[in-house]
Amino acid sequence: MLVVGYGPVGSVLSVLLAQRGWRVTVLERRRRPYTLPRATSFDGETARLLAGAGIGGELGRITEPGTGYQWRTADGRTLLDIGFTTEGRYGWPDANTMHQPALEELLAARAAELPGITVLRDSRVVDLADGPAGVTVTAEDDEGVARTFRARWVVGCDGANSFVRDRMGVSVTDLGFSYEWLLCDVELREPRAFVPTNVQLCDPARPTTLVGSGPGHRRWEFMRLPGERAAELNREETAWRLLAPFGVTPDTARLLRSTTYIFQARWADEWRAGHVLLAGDAAHLMPPFAGQGMCSGVRDVVGLAWRLDLVLRGRAADALLDTYTEERKAQVRESILASVQLGRLICVTDPAAAAERDATVLANQRGRGPGRPDPALPVTRGLLHRPEGADPDTRVPPAGEVLPHGRLLPLSGGAPLDDPVRRGFVLFAKSEAELGLTPERLSFLRDAGAEVVRLWPAGTSPDGTGDLADAVDADGVLRGFLDRYGATALLVRPDYHVFGTAAAAAGVAALVDDLRTRLTAPAPAPAGRAG
Ligand SMILES: O=C(O)/C=C/c1cccc(O)c1
């Protein structure tokens, strides 16, 4: 496996593959880790996915939970007020602010613990050729010395200006929604409270964003006004002048960086061409207003890692990788559209248009403003179970939904068990459910790396084997989820999206058989596929 790019997305992918026993070479063009922040936070579902990369124990140290996200008019009225909880649906705070270099350090340390990951810095990919058996990649160092690599699969996590994407020759859909902002990252010299953590000042005189970015760090973002020159904004004096009204001066803060950045709203139309795949910013870019850029990249590689693992182990056909583009592109498109919608409300510099926006939002408000998109969007197409007779283009809930976090306790009591979903597919079934799984179906599940976990009601202490196959659903979350859908069993994918549910033994058999069919189905027809 070869990964191009060693930002958070490339490192999470490398770790997830190495955890599954694969050798991964990473080619990174920078000589040294990039020490400046880009993303400032990740949501609770992304935190759970990052924990799956083995850094859950350390996330609390490098993050600070966000308390909320408030939008204010120029005269201080509240347009939107979203509270974040520290006990989110996915077992982590809803919003986790961070200093990105700290996250990257954590991931690099995790990668170093694992055998199988080789990170080659100062390696700029200059050529890439796909063939029937795999990909040949050439990289050059700063002196122009070239090295050639061969890999069965290559994943381009090489950012907005992705070489891999360009070489794949895929088209890009660009919504043309783009503004330039000045980003000022500061380290505060003294602790200071900001309530809520994230604020949008919807002032047409200067749309401004204030966000937390991890312990001791914050970011201010200032929109470039019509007629204002980027070169003027890019001066350090400008940053200090704009920060001063917020009490941020050289006496109170250190300016880590100030730079302008033009956000965009676009996605690659194909994320796979033959043995080459895309993830993260190489595949999509979005405005920052819902805090979903990096989170989407992490979701990409979580969805990719388990698919690649099954394909590499010969348990799934290559065609499974086409469901990656199908699912992720649809999800990311929703996140981009939602972020653009927020951006259209924020990036307003005409006072009359701003007054009209304020009046409209306030009139419609009744406690609700323009909503933050639910970060954990369901998968709506791709690798999902559809009961017999169901419309093949329609999702049947809860298929596709993201499973909430449920604490599992060992039958003998004691500390919660490690989350089994991190390791692969899991068939969760109520302890009293008749599963009727034949040895042949059980053997398919085992070969696919799937576990079967019988869920006992909270408060019970039944006799059992005491292993992971039996667990107490400590807070009733998972059994409650099953009850909501009238199900006795559910098959969840390694990315926590529900594959499907069943209400009786026949349904469980159908669920397992459908998974097998979908994993092993060959690609329909090669026509029209690049690569
Ligand atoms: O986490 C959120 O909901 C929003 C984060 C955000 C908003 C605006 C600009 C940013 O850089 C981050």
Image (tube, rainbow, N blue to C red):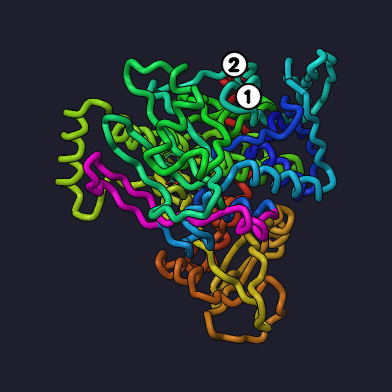
Q: Position of residue 383 (x, y in %)?
A: 54, 44
Q: Quadrant of the C terminus?
A: top right
In this view, 174 is above or below 431: above
Residue under the point 60% across and 59% down: 60
The crowd level at tag 2 (other Cα within 10 Å; few <14, some 14-19, many 20+) is: some
Residue type at tag 1: Ala
**Residue 323 seen in the current view:** no
Q: Is mark 2 within 8 Å of ligand 1?
A: no
Query: What's the magenta region?
Result: 54-83
Q: Is residue 80 found inside the magenta-colored segment of the image?
A: yes
Q: Is residue 494 found inside the magenta-colored segment of the image?
A: no
* The furthest residue to the top: 144
- Identify the secondary structure beneath mark 2: loop
Q: Which dot marks residue 521?
A: none
Q: Earlier in the sequence, mark 1 or mark 2?
A: 2
* The furthest residue to the front: 251
The answer to whether the residues at label 1 and label 2 have Cβ atoms under 8 Å apart is: yes
List the residue tagged with mark 2: 169
Query: From mark 1 to mark 2, how far is it between C-alphas?
Result: 9 Å
List the residue tagged with mark 1: 273
Total labels drawn: 2
Residue type at tag 2: Gly
Query: Between 167 and 89, which is closer to the camera in this rendering?
Result: 89
